[in-house]
Image (cartoon, rainbow, N blue to C red):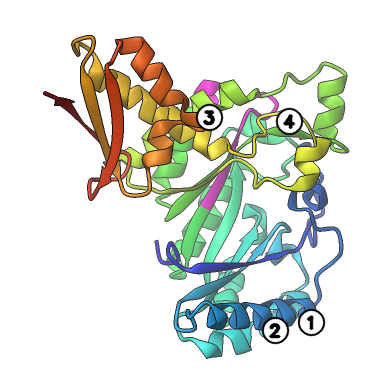
Amino acid sequence: MSSARRRIIPVFIPNLGCEHECVFCDQRLISGEREPVTPEDVSNVCSEALIALADAGESSAAAEVAFYGGSFTALSERRQNELLEAVQPFLKHNARNSIRISTRPDCMDRQAALRLKSFGVGTVELGAQSMCGDVLALSKRGHTAGDVARASGIIKSAGLCLILQMMTGLPGDSREKSLYTAKHIIGLKPDGVRIYPAVVVRGTRLFEMWRDGSYAEHTVEEAVGLCAELCALFDEAGIPVIRLGLNPTDTLSAGGAAAGAYHPAFGELVYSKIYFEKAVSALTGVRPGSGVVITVARGRVSKMAGHRRGNIHALIEKFSLGSLKIVESDIVSCEIKIEIEA
């Protein structure tokens, strides 16, 4: 993916431009931002980012200004251009710098894609959420699965990097429908995906549905298990999952998230489950009392160890191990290697 290793400079534009009221959405609360963003704000963010990169000795590092939150191409063209124009000095600082925007599938056409590219946009994220028509309708998304496929094709044909976002646990959703969505997203060949299990945010229609009993929450435990399955599908297809769960904010953690699959370390929980299941499969038949060394890819030790080292304790107990160590080396991400110590 073209922007996988870039430094991300986030700019949140909550709800700007979007005329729809999806049942799960309150972007101001989810992002922690409530005031509209001005071109001056964007310019200031870019200037501060350049200073921070210089202070860190990374002036030559590639960076990406990412407009998150609102539906960027639902803004007026003039407004879009003003915000993008404010980033241009940042792009001129380094030829490898670029822009990322997030938008809706029904707010993208070829003319818009080419105009975005002319301003230095390199990546477009589409909120697909589901590829099931009934789930989209019950969630009041205002677009169809066909819109997702059409917009994805436009973005890729314009030479832009495509990121697709999906949600699990929406009204009318099920494990089978989420797997269906993932398989259809894979067929669109995105450069990456984000998976956001549904969270019941106060002030949304979903909160009212949950409170009156017409919607059953998507629990953390349920979402962790489902997302582990989804990650396996995307991993097999060679599509990186670049985000699991909402980015934690003080507001959400303080009660803004009333129910649903919200956890500050949600991604860690998912990968811990994935690694635990791999270890269980590899350790089946090991002699009780054995000393075991598990090798994982670099940077994955904490995921194998599990949240609060839960995987280590569970594996030692399950297989009556004498000892368990986790080391890292240059093996394939998400793979593990088991060695039994003499």
**Where does label 2 land, which residue?**
86
Q: What residue type is labelled 4?
A: Leu
State which quarter of the image contains the N terminus: bottom left
**Where does label 1 land, which residue?**
40
Q: Which of marks 1 and 4 is nearer the N terminus?
A: 1
Q: Which of marks 2 and 4 is nearer the N terminus?
A: 2
Q: Does the magenta stretch include residue 210?
A: no
Residue 326: percent from the left, percent from the top?
A: 31, 35
Residue 178 tag number: 3
Residue displayed at 78% across by 50% down: 27
Residue 160: percent from the left, percent from the top?
A: 47, 68
Q: Are marks 2 and 4 in contact (CB under 8 Å)?
A: no
Q: Do the residues labelled 1 and 2 touch (CB within 8 Å)?
A: yes
Q: Is mark 4 on a helix, strand or loop?
A: helix
Judged by depth in the image, the label closer to the viewer, 1 or 3, is: 1
Judged by depth in the image, the label closer to the viewer, 1 or 4, is: 1
Q: How crowded is mark 4: few (under 14 residues within 10 Å), some or many (20 or more)?
A: some
**Where does label 4 land, which residue?**
138
Residue 296: percent from the left, percent from the top?
A: 29, 40
Q: Are marks 2 and 3 in contact (CB under 8 Å)?
A: no
Q: What residue type is labelled 2?
A: Ala
Residue displayed at 35% across by 17% down: 316
Q: In which quarter of the image is residue 173?
A: top right
The span picked out in magenta is 164-178
Residue 117: percent from the left, percent from the top?
A: 53, 77
Q: How crowded is mark 1: few (under 14 residues within 10 Å), some or many (20 or more)?
A: few
Q: Compute the Cα span from label 1 to label 2.
A: 7 Å
Q: Quadrant of residue 119?
A: bottom right
Q: What residue type is labelled 3?
A: Ser
State which quarter of the image contains the C terminus: top left
